[in-house]
Structures are given as C-alpha cells and as structure tokens.
Amino acid sequence: MTQPITDQRPRAELIAELYDLHAAGMFAYCADQLGDLGSASDVLAAVFSRVPAVAPPRAALYAFARREIHRRDVLYSPPAVDPLTDPATALVERALRELRPHQREVLVLCAVCELSTEELAWVLGVASDTAEELVMSAGQRFRQSLGAALASTGPRLPKPVADVFGALAVAPLPDVLGRLPWPQPPGALRIHFAGSRTAAPGPLFVKPRWPSPPVWPQPPAKSDPATSTVIFPAELMTPPSGDRTATHEATTAPMPKYRDSAGGDLLESPVPLRDPLGSTRAFRLPHAVPAKPKPSTPEGPFFLAAPPSTGVEPFATGDVILPKGAPDPYMTGDVLVHQGPARSARRRPPPPPEPQPTPVEFLRLSPPESD
C-alpha cells in the first residue's frame, strides 16, 4: 500500500473508522426516531457516503442524520419487549414511549448516544443553556413516567423482580435505557463502508457482531437526486449560532386577515353586542364604520353576498345576574307562560243547578190525577 503524499489518511479508511465509532449509536437514534430499520439504514448510508476528506465532529454527523430524518416519513413500531418475558425492560420501554417526541429525542441523544450538552446544542441548533434545560426537562419527565409505571405494578411481586424494580428507580438514566434492545446496523452496511477492517469494540448496550456474514443482506441506499450529491453540508461543520433557526423549525407566516366569502372588504369590527341588563345601546368601537352593502356582481353571486342587516342584534351569552324581580329580556327555549284573567274583568255568575230527575218509584206510587 502506497503512502499518501499529504498527511491526510485515505477517505475510505476515515469512513471505516468513523463508521465503527459512531454507526451503532447513530443507527439506534435513527431507528428510534423513524420507527423503521430500513429507513434508518438509508439515513446511515446517506450520512457516511458524504463524509469529507477531513474528519467531521461527531455532532456534525448527528446533525446531518437529524436533517435526513426530517425528510422521511415516520412509522409506528409496536413494543419490542414482551412484558411476560422481561417485565422490567417492558416498563422502561413503556415509560420511554410515553414521552413527547422532542423529549424522547433529547433523552436518546444524551443517555444512549452519550452526547454532551454542547454537542446536543449543535445537533438541535439551539443555545447551550436551552439544551441543558431540555435535558433536565426530558430526564424529569422520564423519571415521573417510570415512577408511575413502577407504582402501578403493585406490592405483591417476586423478590428478584422487586429488586430489579427498586434498582430501576434509583439507577442512572444511561443504565436504565441500556436495558432496551437497541437495534444494530445491518452487516451489509458495515461491509460496504469498512470492508474487512476489524470492528472496534462497541458500547455496552450494543453487542458487536462484526465481522460476520450479513444476516439481513440489504443494499445501500438508492440513488436520490436530493441526497446523493456526495457533498457534506458545510454549515453543519461549525456549531450553530444561538440566533439561527433551522428551516424545519422556523415559525409559519402570519395568518392573513379574514375576508368575507364574496371577496368584500376586510371585517373591520366584530358584530356588536347588546347589554343583557336592559340597555338598548350596542357596544361598538368608536372608529368602527359600518360598511355599505355592495350589489351582487358576476364575480360575487347573490347567494355568496353577505346577508343584509335585519336590525336585530344578538345578545351576549354567559352568566348574567339580573336584579331581583326583573323579567328576563332574552328568554330562550320553549317557555309556557300562564296568562291569567285580567283584574278589571267581572266574574261570571255561577251556572244554575240542573233539575234533579224524578225517581221511577215515585212516579209509580203517586195516585192518578182526577178529572
């Protein structure tokens, strides 16, 4: 093998070394964010295929991987741990899945990938103090979720399981998350980027399987015009400034002002309200000027024009306290009101009693009348 003229190492050797150092943690991060091993392999291939001749920092590689993650779809992955086989690990996975996406991302980058606060700020594109607050918030939320999961198990547990649960409550976050079965990069990618190079020892939560025949032979990422330019983004090689905002995290444009459906003028004032306590004056702004109705045009048909004002103003809703004995001026619903007789009307005389019918026995016993 010939030595290079400059002091720089060959690019293939640099890529192989970077792959052995960062591929395990980066693949676990990509698989956790995307929920699909195939998409995580594509991101890993896209990142290491663009490595420049100069070794980039680890934070730059993760920032590039995060940009590629946001360009792909996220899939839902079912739980990977059976609670009947390993209840302790199942509780850890349950607590991690209950976190919000950004909290889970921060926790995986810090506790699993072991990024520092400065590197996390580099990857997320935020200030260092903001990254520190995100780490504290995510860790506290995970502790609360894990504590609630441990409390829901009940006191009656076998002693070995109870000892493990008690250790999970006080163990550091890297040790707790290290129990999860984090996915490993496929062997085909390692052979593609590192060849027959001896694999460096991986982290404790990853079981190194290299070099070995690929169990799942998967080709490298397909050629994509948007990602296969073989140029590492130059803006990711330096830490971002505190005032820079990523494109996918930028705020949206302000919403336009509302116009009516007929394309008329802007609504300058809201619908006036009326005092529910009996006042007839409407609440209007001092500068509000009612717009004149426009005749219907071919561009705005009559059925799209705003309805003319009927003069009836809506009343205000809510809890309104009326004076005692005051009638409700805005009674709604089906109300039955009894209208009694007027006070000035005279009372009608009672009807005369009906004549009593003559009994049949009395007619029979009475003597006949003489002529």
Image: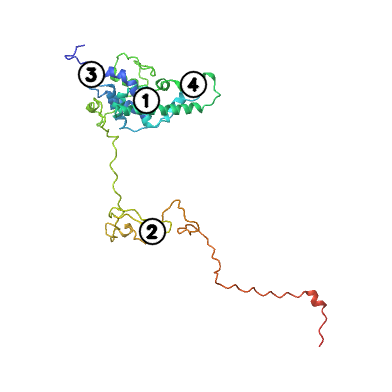
The residue most toward the bottom is 371
232 relative to 322 in the view: left or right: left
- Circles 2 and 4: CB atoms closer than 8 Å: no
Using the image as rendered, state which of residue 260 and residue 71 is in the foreground: 260
The residue most toward the left is 5
Q: Nearer the viewer, mark 3 or mark 1?
A: 1
What is the secondary structure assignment of the residue under circle 1?
helix
Q: Mark 1 points at which residue?
A: 108
267 relative to 166 in the view: left or right: left
344 relative to 116 in the view: left or right: right
- Circles 4 and 3: CB atoms closer than 8 Å: no
Label 4, label 3: how far apart the Cα atoms are: 49 Å
Label 1, label 2: how far apart the Cα atoms are: 58 Å
The residue type indicated by label 3 comes to Arg
The residue type indicated by label 2 comes to Glu
Label 2, label 3: how far apart the Cα atoms are: 77 Å
Q: In which quarter of the image is residue 39?
A: top left
Q: Which of marks 4 and 3 is nearer the N terminus?
A: 3
Task: Judge whether residue 219 can be spotted in this image.
Answer: no
- Circles 1 and 2: CB atoms closer than 8 Å: no
What is the secondary structure assignment of the residue under circle 2?
loop
| Above or below for 278 versus 77 | below
Label 4, label 1: how far apart the Cα atoms are: 23 Å
Q: Name the residue under label 2.
A: 313
| Above or below for 279 versus 125 | below
In the drawing, what numbered circle is on residue 11? Answer: 3
- Circles 4 and 1: CB atoms closer than 8 Å: no
Using the image as rendered, state which of residue 278 and residue 134 is in the foreground: 278
The residue type indicated by label 4 comes to Gly
| Above or below for 345 versus 289 | below
